[in-house]
Image (cartoon, rainbow, N blue to C red):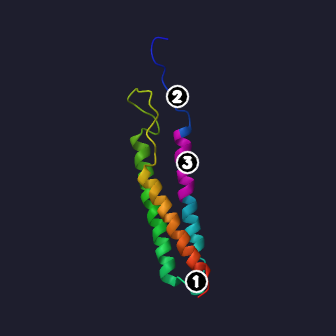
């Protein structure tokens, strides 16, 4: 009991990163599946599909780069400064807002696309 015990972060930071990576992978899969819908069958048409794909891939790319950068900055989820504070979160609030807005935009396009032209 000579001093404060080192905090054992366990696998939580790594699980968080893997969770985000799974989310981004599934976002890309859903985008590719959306491209299988013939543009003539939707109200949004080809332009709507291209906008949806652009939003999804753009958001996925930005978030993937951000997550990798944050993972490296936090020394793979650990703090090197010797403090007992938990590691910094991988996703910043703006990243969560970006994902939410992308999902909202895609939902609107999907609803509009659901009705035949």
Q: Which mark is residue 103?
A: none
* Residue 62, percent from left and from top: 42, 59
Does dot 2 land on a helix, a strand or a loop? loop
Q: Label the magenta part by its dominant secondary structure.
A: helix
Q: Which mark is residue 8?
A: 2
x 50%, y 79%: residue: 48
Q: Nearer the viewer, mark 2 or mark 1?
A: 1
Residue denoted by label 3: 18
x 46%, y 11%: residue: 2
Q: Earlier in the sequence, mark 1 or mark 3?
A: 3
Count the labels in the image: 3
Q: Earlier in the sequence, mark 3 or mark 2?
A: 2
Residue 90 appears left or right of 107? left
Above or below 15: residue 36: below
Residue 30 shows in this picture = yes
* Residue 5, percent from left and from top: 49, 20
Task: Assess whether residue 63 is covered by the magenta stretch.
Answer: no
Residue 64 shows in this picture = no
Does dot 3 land on a helix, a strand or a loop? helix
Alpha carbon of mark 3 to alpha carbon of mark 2: how far?
19 Å
* Residue 80, percent from left and from top: 40, 31
Residue denoted by label 1: 42
For the record, the magenta segment spans 13-24
Task: Assess whether residue 18 is covered by the magenta stretch.
Answer: yes
């Amino acid at each position: 009991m000579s001093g404060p015990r080192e905090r054992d972060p366990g696998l939580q930071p790594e699980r968080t990163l893997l969770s985000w990576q799974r989310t981004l992978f599934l976002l890309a899969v859903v985008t590719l599946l959306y491209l299988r819908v013939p543009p003539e069958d939707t109200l949004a048409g080809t332009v709507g599909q291209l906008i949806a794909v652009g939003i999804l891939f753009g958001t996925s790319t930005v978030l993937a780069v951000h997550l990798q950068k944050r993972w490296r900055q936090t020394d793979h989820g650990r703090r090197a400064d010797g403090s007992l504070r938990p590691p910094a979160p991988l996703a910043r609030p703006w990243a969560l807002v970006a994902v939410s807005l992308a999902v909202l935009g895609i939902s609107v396009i999907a609803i509009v696309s659901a009705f035949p032209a």
